[in-house]
Image: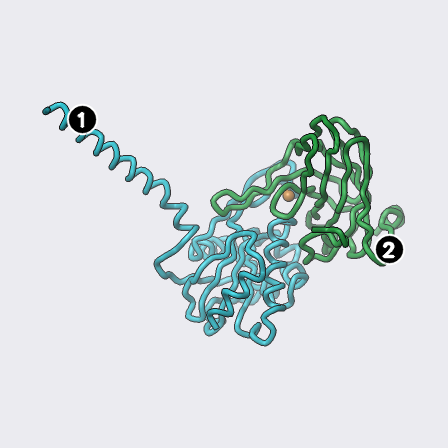
Chain colours: A cyan, B green
Amino acid sequence: MRLRHIQIGLWVMAGLAALAYGAFILRPQMNTQTHETTFRSEFFLADGAGQLRTTDEFAGKFQLVFFGFTNCPDVCPTTLSEVAQVMDDLGDAAAKVQPIFISIDPERDRRLGIDTFAHAFHPAILGLTGDAEATRAAAESFKTFFEREDATDATDGYTMSHSAALYLIGPKGDWLRQFDYGTPADAILSDLKSRF
Amino acid sequence: MKNLLPAMAFLLAAPMAQACETFTSGDISVQQAWSRASIGTGRPAVLYLEITNSGAMDDALLGLTTPAASMPMLHETTVTDGVAAMPHAASIPVPAGQTVALSPGGFHGMLMGLTDPLVEGQTFPITLTFEQAGNLDVTVDILSMRAKGAACDDAK
Ligand SMILES: [Cu+2]
């Protein structure tokens, strides 16, 4: 009888430990997947002309923000094409949305030219190449991830890994949601229209 | 600029409608080969296509060469917990009786060290090397930077 109680007690403790561990390892993932609490995302970054651009400038507009780099021929053009499609399909309502492409490889992208790349997809897309510190701060405020990876077989000896989601920021600067990589333009468009 | 002549030789003007030819070697056929236009030569370009293995033996794509780029490689885009990376793919399996796509967000050819800018509406040649079927020459259509898929009439 006594032994059985201890046994049950041990099982309960093991169960609680498993739950706690599960919650612990799932937590970082939940941070990037769904966000229930509101927070503000900000950037203070130079544009292609070297002018400082900040989030406040776009108050009153929705911002569609993507972090990437121009040496990325697969994921980044795919997402920027969807963003371009959204801007085209918005018609007159395009004035309510500011698409922004933040380079997480700003030094190289400043040299290669962020504007020519961003504008090749859509003239409305604002490309930003801040300094390393400001770029890191912007990424942190969006709770987005990027990392440089050395690779001898890559151009310039390195490549970047980065969160591939597209972030939607509201007119008051509040983080509203993310669109996972591969979300088609139609889905982004109907989400936006439901908020106007 | 100094290499303009040899470069022009392989950048053949495309016909009015993209042909989306099928290229075949043994049991392997490749169709819907396309790329996106580039801005200059400073950034890597991409290569997408479909490979069909109509034979009874598994095959694999081992690599590619092209006069369009000095360092062409096979890559696989992976998205793990929302984070995208594109590691080198040593080979791309093409199992017997199956069609495998190199497509946005998945396997792709990574064309580093472009010889010349890729111009929309033009084409460039590549040579694919398969484990079983050997070498296969394929012509790649250059589409706009905003293209999401091959521009053939029969494309999905
Ligand atoms: Cu790649």
Mark 2 belongs to which amino acid?
A: Pro
Taking B107 as reference, is B148 above or below it?
A: below
Q: Mark number for residue B15?
A: 2
Using the image, tell me which numbered label, if any, was put on residue A7: 1
Q: Give the chain of mark 1.
A: A
Q: How many marks?
A: 2
Query: Quick check: can you spot residue B112?
Result: no
Can residue A73 be seen in the rendering of this structure? yes
For disc 1, the neighbor class at 10 Å (few under 14, some 14 to 19, many from 20) is few
Q: Residue at x 75, y 47 (%)?
A: B32
Label 2 element class: loop
Indicate which quadrant contains ligand 1.
Answer: top right
Q: Disc 2 is attached to a residue of which chain?
A: B
The quarter of the displayed image where residue A39 is located: bottom left
Q: Residue at x 47, y 57 (%)?
A: A178
Distance (Cα) linking label 2 and label 1: 78 Å
